Image (cartoon, rainbow, N blue to C red):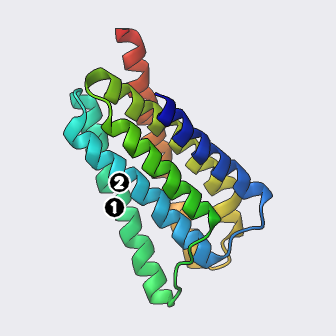
């Protein structure tokens, strides 16, 4: 469980640090968005194969589908705008945190895996929403990029609520 805490702390630090750091430019925002979605896709693919709960498996499948769709939209937009996504300290820290989370999840099985995955999903989506609201949407200069971020926000809210529901169900079973 220690690695989950480290990955979570990294994500929390990165997202909370977004507001106090220099505002990211559109190319950096694009890279952050793709990185954040890829992290959830990778965790979701792992959960599709390792989760023991049908609810967790279904949630993981939804994460893979939805976040793949967001990445496709983001990639199409930056290609059309001729913007090259720019790696940055935030995206690098997100990637490192995602890698640590995956390493931890790979070491778990059964109910322990399911709980760690869902716990991470709740906190991760809370932090993504915070970053969207406080930094990414306000910092986006390109109106189409801003519109995409605003458009996908409700899906992140739905993911968070779904993860919280699954987490609450686990609390009742314990």
- From the image, state whether disc 1 or disc 2 is nearer to you: 2
Q: Which residue ends up furthest to the bottom in the rendered image?
A: 82
Whether residue 150 is visible: yes
Image quadrant in which the C terminus is located: top left
Query: What residue appears at the point 54 percent right and 72 percent down from the top-left corner?
Result: 30
Q: Is residue 85 above or below residue 44?
A: below
Whether the residues at callouts 1 and 2 have beta carbons within 8 Å, the answer is yes
Q: Which mark is residue 41?
A: 2
Q: Quadrant of residue 23?
A: bottom right
Q: Is residue 84 above or below residue 119?
A: below
Q: Which residue is mark 1?
A: 68
Mark 1: few/some/many CA within 10 Å (<14, 14-19, 20+) = some
Q: Which mark is residue 141?
A: none
Q: Is residue 159 above or below residue 118?
A: below
Percent position (x, y) of residue 43?
35, 47
Q: Is residue 97 left or right of residue 141?
A: left
């Amino acid at each position: 469980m220690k690695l989950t805490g480290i990955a979570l702390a990294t994500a929390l630090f990165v997202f909370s640090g977004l507001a106090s750091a220099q505002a990211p430019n559109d190319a950096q925002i694009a890279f952050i968005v793709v990185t954040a979605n890829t992290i959830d896709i990778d965790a979701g693919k792992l959960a599709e194969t390792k989760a023991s709960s049908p609810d967790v498996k279904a949630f993981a499948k939804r994460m893979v589908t939805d976040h793949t769709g967001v990445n496709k939209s983001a990639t199409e937009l930056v290609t059309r705008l001729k913007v090259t996504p720019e790696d940055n300290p935030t995206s690098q820290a997100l990637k490192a945190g995602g890698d640590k989370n995956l390493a931890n999840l790979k070491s778990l099985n059964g109910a322990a895996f399911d709980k760690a995955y869902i716990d991470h999903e709740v906190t991760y989506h809370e932090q993504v929403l915070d970053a969207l609201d406080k930094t990414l949407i306000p910092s986006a200069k390109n109106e189409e990029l801003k519109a995409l971020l605003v458009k996908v926000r409700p899906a992140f809210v739905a993911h968070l609520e779904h993860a919280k529901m699954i987490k609450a169900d686990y609390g009742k079973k314990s």
